């Protein structure tokens, strides 16, 4: 029987999970899976080692109304039943918001659980699903240690000016500041960057995490110095369904002039905007790239335009650019989007090797490029698993 760490990464409509050997530094999962379409038409896919796992009934029989809680419960029950060769020793969760309190991974006890609940209003779309997974584990396996790993931690030590809004001081004192997200993804990239860049990894790097949620992080010395998401995961780049940066006056207009209720504005900005809102076709970049609809094309144009503008802003903060890294669903898989955004960074010295980009190679800059262009797969689950192993070694909090 192999002792394993279970990782749970609950998105708004997805649940990614993995099993890692319970030893410090383990980098390869024994099993990795994902349920997408939660709330509409859930589909499970899983990989064991390098191979896609053939998913058989009844594992694949996920009811249409399955919740994150139900899925986590099923996973743990199966680990006690048909997959008894794996013995879970701890569960690590991706928790979107750590607020001003949590600087790094922490063992979840009753006090921590309560504090995490208090942060729900700061990440209403994600935090409840994250906590539902925590509660499901507490219910079915109360003896298992659980560790919270935060998307905000990587940005915790950003310079003060990068965190401040130009709002009355009392609000920043209350914690209305820019937190930044996708920290587990950025931590992974910062961790592996020296493999590809050597000493240059410690230079001026922009990482573009382009998935359904999208953000960019400026790193210097492999630490976050600025990022595009702010107080919530609504800010910054245009996303699948989220609007990204928006003149706050638009929100006032919607409420004061158009009489919209706050809940409806919330729904519009989080669920009906971004690629979906502009295209009127889909939030999925694959569908938009295959579409001949002019609105789909304009949505892609705006996505790239926004990304190029943010690169300019982050490069200004860094004082130049040594490397531009693409990761997450769109960044890893769309050669077209990578090429358009990299072209927009030409003025910074980035020169593309178009063929290497099309082939999906890790490094796709030309020999005379002053900026390294890289495509690196993200691995949030791996970061969670290593944090849990570390926490277990330390016997509790590891931050
Ligand atoms: P993530 O949130 O990182 O899982 O990324 C999900 C998004 O990646 C999807 O909504 C798609 O828009 C995008 N994506 C995945 N594969 C591809 C691909 N081959 N080409 C373009 N976009 C892709």
Image (cartoon, grey):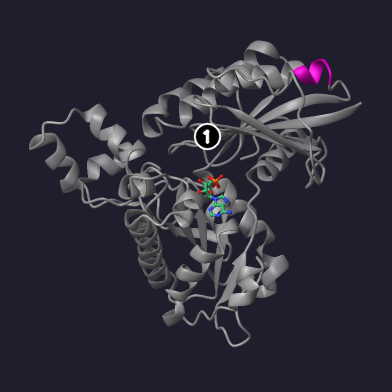
How far from the left and from the top, in percent, is residue 124? 39, 30
Instruction: Identify which residue, 209 or 392, lies in the foreground.
Output: 209
How far from the left and from the top, in percent, is residue 300? 39, 58
Tell me if mark 1 has few (under 14), some (14-19) or many (20+) residues whose alpha carbon lies within 10 angstroms of its own.
Answer: many
Which quadrant of the view contains residue 304? Answer: bottom left
Residue annotated with mark 1: 11
How far from the left and from the top, in percent, is residue 47? 76, 39
Give the quarter of the figure containing the C terminus: top right
What is the residue that sits farthest to the top in this orientation?
Answer: 139
Residue at the (70%, 69%) spot, across then down: 196
Please determine whether, in this image, residue 10 is positioned above or below residue 327. Answer: above
Instruction: Identify which residue, 46 or 134, lies in the foreground.
Output: 46
Is 80 included in the stretch rendered in magenta?
Answer: yes
- The magenta stretch spans which residues? 78-82
Instruction: Identify which residue, 283 or 75, lies in the foreground.
Output: 283
What is the residue that sits farthest to the bottom in this orientation?
Answer: 368
Residue 131: in sight, yes or no? yes
Callout 1: helix, strand or loop? loop
């Amino acid at each position: 029987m192999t002792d394993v760490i279970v990782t749970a990464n609950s998105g708004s409509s997805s649940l990614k999970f993995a099993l890692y050997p319970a030893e410090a530094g383990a980098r390869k999962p024994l099993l990795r899976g994902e349920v997408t379409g939660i709330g509409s038409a859930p589909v499970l896919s899983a990989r064991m080692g390098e191979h896609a796992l053939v998913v058989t009934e009844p594992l694949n029989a996920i009811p249409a109304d399955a919740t994150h809680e139900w899925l986590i419960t099923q996973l743990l029950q199966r680990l006690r039943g048909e997959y008894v060769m794996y013995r879970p020793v701890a569960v690590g969760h991706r928790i979107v918001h750590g607020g001003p309190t949590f600087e790094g991974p922490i063992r979840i006890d009753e006090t921590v659980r309560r504090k995490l609940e208090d942060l729900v209003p700061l990440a209403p779309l994600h935090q409840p699903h994250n906590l539902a997974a925590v509660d499901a584990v507490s219910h079915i396996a109360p003896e298992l240690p659980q560790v919270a790993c935060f998307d905000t931690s990587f940005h915790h030590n950003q310079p003060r000016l990068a965190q401040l809004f130009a709002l009355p001081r009392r609000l920043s004192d209350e914690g209305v500041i820019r937190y930044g997200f996708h920290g587990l993804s950025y931590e992974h990239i910062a961790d592996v960057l020296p493999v590809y860049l050597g000493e240059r990894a410690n230079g001026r790097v922009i990482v573009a995490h382009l998935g359904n949620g999208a953000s960019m992080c400026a790193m210097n010395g492999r630490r976050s110095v600025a990022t595009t998401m702010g107080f919530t995961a609504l800010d910054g780049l245009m996303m699948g369904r989220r609007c990204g940066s928006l003149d706050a006056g638009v929100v006032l207009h919607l409420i004061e002039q158009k009489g919209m209720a706050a809940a409806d504005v919330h729904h519009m900005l989080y669920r009906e905007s971004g690629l979906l809102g502009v295209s009127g076709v889909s939030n999925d970049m694959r569908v938009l790239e295959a579409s001949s609809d002019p609105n789909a094309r304009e949505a892609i144009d705006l996505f790239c335009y926004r990304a190029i503008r943010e690169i300019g802003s982050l490069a200004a903060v860094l004082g130049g650019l040594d490397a531009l890294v693409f990761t997450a669903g769109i960044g890893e898989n769309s050669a077209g989007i990578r090429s358009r955004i990299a072209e927009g960074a030409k003025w910074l010295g980035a020169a593309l090797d178009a063929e290497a980009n099309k082939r999906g190679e890790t490094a796709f800059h030309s020999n005379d490029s002053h900026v390294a262009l890289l495509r690196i797969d993200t691995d949030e689950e791996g970061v969670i698993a290593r944090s849990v192993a570390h926490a277990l070694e330390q016997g509790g909090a590891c931050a």
